[in-house]
Image: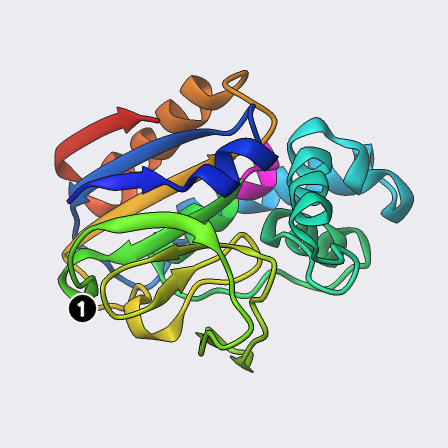
């Protein structure tokens, strides 16, 4: 599968770097040991941040700036990493979904990067990172139909599959997922991207028996 970035995204977000992981996995319900790692990170965020300061971290700040440049209000459609961190600081528990999704959430709150995770068997053709249009139909996971006009969006041949705010229900990770692709969206540039990829791969190996791992950068 090839991933390309449209000119409009490149022009608006020249620092953008992508970290890509493709792998085979065994998904499951989240183990207590993974959730112990989540709780450690949750405690750190509660200790280090207030609501007012969450969006000042460079990764979240630059994702918000990308939204503004493309015409989207980041206070109405918050990047997923920001939304998760705000939830933590407000004292609302992080929801358990399954091992793969919970790994992505853990990596996201630790790094500040919004991360897309997709079932490879549900993707139709290659992907392009482009900008959402007014007539795009996009059913977001747990949110229903979402207006993605002005949001960065990954599209396959069928339509949109993921934005930094939410991924699409059509290509979501489930307990049946055995082959996945993860895209780490670093609108702030390459700094911290290698470390975040390493962290993610380590968790995938430890908790989801990941193998046949391919790593790439754009």
- Eyeballing the image, is 174 above or below 215? below
Quadrant of the image occupied by residue 174? bottom left
Q: Position of residue 71 (x, y in %)?
A: 70, 54
Q: How many marks?
A: 1
Per the image, label 1 sits on a secondary structure element best described as loop
Q: Position of residue 153 (x, y in %)?
A: 46, 55
Measuring 37% from the left and 58% from the top, which residue is drawn there? 30
| Of residues 154 and 121, the one drawn nearer to the viewer in this rendering | 154
Measuring 45% from the left and 19% from the top, which residue is drawn there? 195
Prevailing secondary structure of the magenta residues: helix
| Of residues 44 and 132, the one drawn nearer to the viewer in this rendering | 132
Give the left or right position of residue 81, taking residue 160 as reference.
Answer: right
Quadrant of the image occupied by residue 176? bottom left
Label 1 sits on residue: 176
| Of residues 212 and 171, the one drawn nearer to the viewer in this rendering | 171
Q: Position of residue 57 (x, y in %)?
A: 74, 31
- Eyeballing the image, is 195 above or below 212? above
In this rendering, does residue 37 appear at all?
no
Q: Residue furthest bottom?
A: 144
Q: Quadrant of the C terminus?
A: top left
> Does 97 lie within the magenta span?
no
Q: Quadrant of the N terminus?
A: top left
Sort mark 1 into few (<14), some (14-19) or many (20+) by Cα contacts within 10 Å.
Answer: few
> Does 112 lie within the magenta span?
yes
Q: Position of residue 68 (x, y in %)?
A: 73, 47
- Eyeballing the image, is 41 above or below 124? above
| Of residues 141 and 151, the one drawn nearer to the viewer in this rendering | 151
The segment highlighted magenta reads: 107-113
Measuring 73% from the left and 36% from the top, which residue is drawn there? 61
Measuring 38% from the left and 74% from the top, which residue is drawn there? 169
């Amino acid at each position: 599968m090839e991933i390309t970035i449209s000119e409009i995204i490149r022009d608006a977000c020249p620092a953008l770097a992508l970290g890509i992981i493709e792998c085979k996995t065994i998904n499951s319900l989240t183990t207590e040991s993974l959730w112990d790692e989540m709780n450690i990170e949750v405690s750190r965020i509660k200790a280090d941040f207030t609501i007012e300061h969450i969006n000042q971290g460079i990764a979240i700040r630059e994702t918000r700036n990308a939204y503004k440049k493309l015409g989207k209000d980041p206070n109405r459609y918050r990047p997923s990493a920001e939304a998760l961190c705000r939830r933590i600081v407000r004292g609302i528990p992080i929801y358990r979904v399954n091992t793969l999704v919970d790994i992505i959430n853990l990596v996201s709150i630790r790094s500040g990067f919004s991360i897309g995770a997709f079932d490879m068997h549900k993707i139709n053709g290659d992907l392009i990172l482009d900008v959402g249009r007014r007539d795009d139909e996009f059913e977001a996971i747990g949110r229903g139909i979402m207006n993605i006009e002005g949001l960065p969006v990954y599209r396959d041949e069928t339509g949109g599959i993921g934005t930094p705010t939410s991924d699409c229900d059509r290509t979501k990770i489930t307990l049946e997922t055995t082959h996945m692709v993860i895209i780490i969206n670093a609108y702030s540039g390459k700094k911290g991207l290698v470390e975040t990829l390493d962290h993610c791969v380590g968790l995938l190996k430890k908790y989801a028996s990941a193998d046949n791992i391919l790593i790439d950068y754009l």
